[in-house]
Image (cartoon, rainbow, N blue to C red):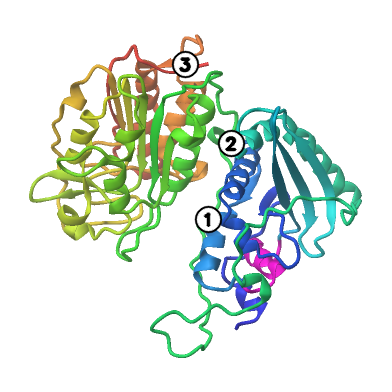
Amino acid sequence: MKSILSLLLFFPILAFAQNTLVIFPYTEEGESICDNYNVYNTKMVLQTIEEACIYNAFNVIETQPRMRKIQAENVCHLRNNQIRKAVMGQRQKSYIEFSYALHKTPKGNYLDLYLFLRDANSNDVFVVQKMTSKKRYSSNVKEFAQRLIQLNFDEFKQQCNLARKNGTKVDISSMEIPSIAPAQKTDYAKGKQPKPQKGSKGAKEKEVVVAPVVEKFPLSDVDQNIPTYGNVNENAVAVVIGNRTYRNNDVPEVKFAINDAKMVKSYLKYGFGFKEENIIYIEDASQADFNAIFGIKGNAKGKLYNYVKPNVSDVFVYYSGHGAPNPETNKGYFVPVDTDPSLIHFNGYSLDTFYENLSLVPYKSLTIVVDACFSGSSEGGMLLKNISPVFIKSENKVLRDENVVILTSAASEQVSSWYNEKYHSLFTYYYLKGLQGAADTNKDRKVTLGEMKAYIVDNVPYMARRLNNREQTPEITGSDDVILIQR
């Protein structure tokens, strides 16, 4: 097996700022950090803490994608500290660790949540904060954790700032910290090598190679001060897809697609009141993902259809990624990450099927936001070589439904621009900026579709010309009186 130095080369070395955070589940000696990551409730608590950190303007290194890569490469038998260093990189100075325990009593259940600030090199503890929830007749660990984090995160952040300044350590050797190890463990913690996969020759150790993790971007103005809806839209359902990295080497990446998708999801949760469990969120969606979510031609009953409460649910669909045309038919397609654009008719996801299946979903209202171009070109380069601009044709009753709002980033023959300075696509940036309040021209704390349309049309075409010397004309349909967000 390669040395730990080789393992550290899994990921690019970044110059981490002091407000960069990495979050791990508490793992005792003799337990496996990989096992702990596989516990469902652990993933839910980790996600909650990461979201709180992002909301509070920290740069967060997402550990779960990196842990999946480590597990895929069969190196979980290494020491936990080696794995942590591989995830963090060499320059990270501290990290957050958490543990939790759900207690069930006849008078209701409650959650204990522990947060630790640790030194990345020595693993010394600088801060310990224990939080205990009120009793409820619920076993939803994520909801417990979300409430505790909302109430206590500011205090934890203050303690961390003081600890960094004073350098005081905390002895936790006598503390009874709950273990989150799963009931059934693998042999990782015992130091055993994983068995060779079938078809491998002998037990020779292979060189570990893990693809780089998606770059994290600094926060822009639309990533902070997200407007608060105030109420929970109990039955609202959303699909959010960000396709950045394509498996075909000839297909350029969509640099900010995942950044766009993450922030749209945050606006849905905090700005629109969508519940976490009602948001179908996918990064780098394959054709199978599109089929599973939206259904296939002739059968609309995919995951979205099944999530919707008939005539009660408001539905929101967002896509950021590539689109492509079929030059022979003038039909448009979403480009899943496993697609060959030259065979888009066979392995893309048809816009006609998309709109047709959405028309069969029994929504109360439907909002569609598509940040993609269908011209065969893109900001990152050409998807299809040697083609002329294609004017996409798509007709469906969804396009004429008074309960439907559709916002697309550009005309079908145009290219959707990036806004590099803001780390988002140009269209999504101004869409979020409008929701944040910039589109509220009459200052009544509501943003209508009419106001959003005027704001986007005033800014996106101008900035596309200014930044890239190209035409980009967003297309927006729906009643101007529709309220998009109300604070």
Q: Which residue is mark 1?
A: 215
Q: Please give the name of the residue rendered at 23% of the width and 38% of the height, measured from the top-left corner.
A: 354
Is residue 385 at all visible to an observer of this figure?
Answer: no
- Please report the bounds of the magenta region as a residue range: 77-91
What amino acid is found at the position of numbered circle 2 in the picture? Asn
> Is the C-beta separation of discs 2 and 3 under 8 Å?
no
Where 178 falls versus 251 (above or below)?
Answer: above
Q: Is residue 461 left or right of residue 29?
A: left
> Given the image, on which type of amino acid does mark 3 rest?
Asp
Give x and y (percent) for residue 421.
Answer: 51, 43
Name the front one of labels 1 and 3: 1
3D distance between C-alphas at marks 2 and 3: 37 Å
Q: Are marks 1 and 3 in contact (CB under 8 Å)?
A: no
Q: Residue at x 61, y 82 (%)?
A: 2
For label 2, the residue is 140
Between 347 and 92, the one nearer to me in the picture: 347
- Between label 2 and label 1, give the one nearer the viewer: 2
Image position, residue 335 (x, y; %): 27, 51
Q: Residues within 10 Å of mark 1 (few under 14, many from 20)?
A: few
Task: Kindly report the distance in space between the C-alpha atoms of the residues bearing marks 1 and 3.
Answer: 33 Å
The residue closer to the viewer here, 461 or 152, is 152
Of mark 2 and mark 3, the one earlier in the sequence is 2
Magenta stretch encompasses residue 447: no
Asked whether 40 or 323 is in front, the reply is: 40
* Residue 86 falls within the magenta-colored stretch: yes
Q: Which mark is residue 440?
A: 3
Q: Is residue 288 above or below residue 223?
A: below
